[in-house]
Amino acid sequence: MSALTLTDIRIMDPESGRDEVGHVLIEDGRIAALGDTPVRGEVIDGHRLTCAPGLIDARVKAGEPGQENRETLATAAKAALAGGVTQIVVQPQTEPIIDDLSLVDFILRKGEALDVDVHVAGALTKGLDGRTMTEIGLMTDAGAVFFASGPNPVEDAQIMRRLMAYSATFNALISNSPVTPALSNGTCAHESDVSARLGLPAAPAISERIMAERDMALAELTGGRLLLDLISSAETVDSVRRVKGRDIDVSASVSINHLALNELDIGDYRTFAKLDPPLREERDRQALLRGVEDGTIDIIVSDHDPQSAGRKRLPFAEAAPGAVGLELLLAVGLKLAAEEELDLMAFLRAVTINPADLLGLKGGRLSVGAPADLVIFSETDPWVLDSEALLSRSKNTPFDDRRMTGRVRHTIKAGRIVYSAT
């Protein structure tokens, strides 16, 4: 019987709200005891360290299949473990698009050889064309945990209504990009004084709210389960908060980038800070932080989107949007907590138990009998991010050269130490 004990460590369980110093005993891949427990097996001294459930990142773009030069599942897994992430959900934007059960099966089989649990979000429409429904039922049976529209929304309200009604028969979760194409096509920034000064084509924040309001109304009509994917504006947070007061199955996600950065981080056309949705005003960032703390926003994701230097080092309007984030999801969250901008337990809840419950996954909890998928981290270690040291195959991050506070020391999967910081 294999055993591992974490001694005198801060135990944080977002499911129960438990926050205390004690021991964690792990036996045969599961948590055997917490608190005042005997010390057995290998020992990790947890003095001045914190233990939490392994993170679940529900929005990861992998280059495999089709764009392995940007990222493979294996390199994504290494980056995930270095960031304390033990489960990832791969988005459907691969080549080919993950729009049938054979591709769902392909990703899941590739993931079996890795030290992270790999899950799949299937495409909502064939080839992400926004028109032709996929076999949601068959892909659900194959193991897809939810269904996404990709970067472009399902624009036709009738098609979206049919998708929601159809998915409701399988209790499947679907997400649609909350953006109104008529207001956003051809833009690359948030409409504000900053984008006007920089001369960038920009879209108003209302573009997001209009589509979000439409989809929440369709969720009410059909009884479907809706995930508003990557909300970024104060207006949308207010809309979601109002709807959640009614009997409508709506949840929302936010990127860690939008919790930590605002439009000023674009600076002098910094393309590594070009994201989709675009970075918005400070008031939007503050509204997103409060939305996480009060439960309006359910999950925080890295929105891991690896891009080559060649696709980033272009004029701002032509550069590809996106940033790598698997390795940085926890680190940036710890920085926000250290600066007292975001409650640490609220952050952990949004990257562990909330995505686990929303997607029907095991893990996300630190309790006796639960899988021993854990992250051990320091809340206070100061360090400076060097993008070249990231384990992701691509290095595109807006946090390069930033001072950080707190980092991962160990990641444990099924009771085994699968990553340790050097």
Image: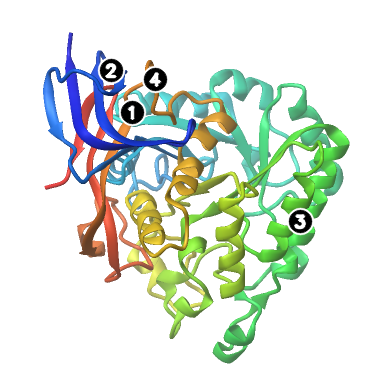
Q: Note whether residue 195 is visible.
A: yes
> Where, by quadrant of the figure, is residue 409 drawn?
top left
Q: Amino acid at mark 3?
A: Ser
Q: Is residue 267 above or below residue 45?
A: below
Q: Residue at x 51, y 48 (%)?
A: 300
Q: Residue at x 25, y 20 (%)?
A: 26
* Residue underneath mark 3: 239
Q: Amino acid at mark 1?
A: Asp
Label 1 vs 3, first from the N-terminus: 3
Task: Measure how far apart labels 1 and 4 are at the Cα level.
Answer: 8 Å
Q: Amino acid at mark 4?
A: Ala
The single residue placed furthest to the bottom in the displayed view is 197
* Residue underneath mark 2: 29
* Residue underneath mark 1: 373
The location of residue 311, given as percent across then percent down, is: 41, 66
Colour approach in the figure = rainbow
Task: Measure how far apart labels 2 and 4 are at the Cα level.
Answer: 9 Å
| Contact check, label 1 and label 3, Cβ < 8 Å | no
Secondary element type, mark 3: helix
Task: Measure how far apart labels 4 and 3 are at the Cα level.
Answer: 36 Å
